[in-house]
Amino acid sequence: MTRIAFSLWNERIAPVFDVARNLWIVDASEGQIVGQTGRRFASDDPHERAMRLTTLQIEQLVCGAITRSTYEVLVSHGIKVVSFVAGDLSQVLNACLRNCLGDGHLSMPGCGNGRRKRSQGNCRRLHLQEQQIKD
């Protein structure tokens, strides 16, 4: 089982993790949600945030923009950080469960060019299918 935290603002991934207050925490096993809950940060201090995530047994954080100093504090606490992600929680959560966050279609504007490989063809096809359903 993996415990993943998503930094939220209005049911979307928060644009900047360092000042976001809300987390959505998902316990996942074999690509399926087995539990989920919401939590809040009480502080903007990177060390306090890292301790809170550690106490909550978070293994991975999915967030928008994040400062290098905060990123380094989280990583030093053993938390894998998937940053510069944008989108509705449901879209991001589904992509995360399918292991498709790295394909770039949910990158913040200006963050996907050249930094993330689009080698996950299956994820790209799923994204295109989702777009066709919406249209």
Image (cartoon, rainbow, N blue to C red):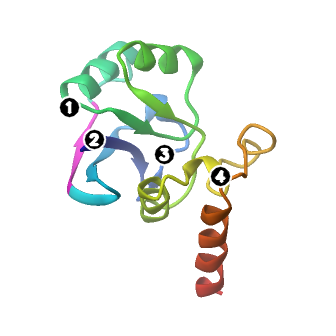
Mostly what secondary structure, the magenta segment?
strand
Name the residue: 60% across, 62% down.
Answer: 123
Q: Is residue 77 above or below residue 87?
A: above
Query: Which residue was labeled with disc 1?
Result: 56
Left or right: residue 64 versus residue 9 is: right
Query: Percent from the top left, x then y, of residue 82?
Result: 51, 37
> Of discs 1 and 2, which sits in the foreground?
2
Query: Percent from the top left, x then y, of residue 36?
Result: 22, 54
- Circle 3: is it few (<14), some (14-19), or many (20+) Cα within 10 Å? many
Residue range of the region highlighted in magenta in the rendering:
35-41
Label drawn at residue 29: none
Q: Earlier in the sequence, mark 4 or mark 1?
A: 1
Q: Are marks 3 and 1 in contact (CB under 8 Å)?
A: no
Query: Which residue was labeled with disc 2?
Result: 3
Query: Percent from the top left, x then y, of residue 77?
Result: 35, 15
> Of discs 2 and 3, which sits in the foreground?
2
Q: Are marks 4 and 2 in contact (CB under 8 Å)?
A: no
Q: Are marks 3 and 4 in contact (CB under 8 Å)?
A: no
The amino acid marked with disc number 1 is Leu
> Of discs 3 and 4, which sits in the foreground?
4
- Circle 1: is it few (<14), some (14-19), or many (20+) Cα within 10 Å? some
Left or right: residue 31 versus residue 104 is: left
Report the Cα–Cα distance between label 3 and label 4. 20 Å
The amino acid marked with disc number 2 is Arg
Report the Cα–Cα distance between label 4 and label 2. 21 Å
Q: Are marks 1 and 2 in contact (CB under 8 Å)?
A: yes
Q: Earlier in the sequence, mark 3 or mark 1?
A: 3
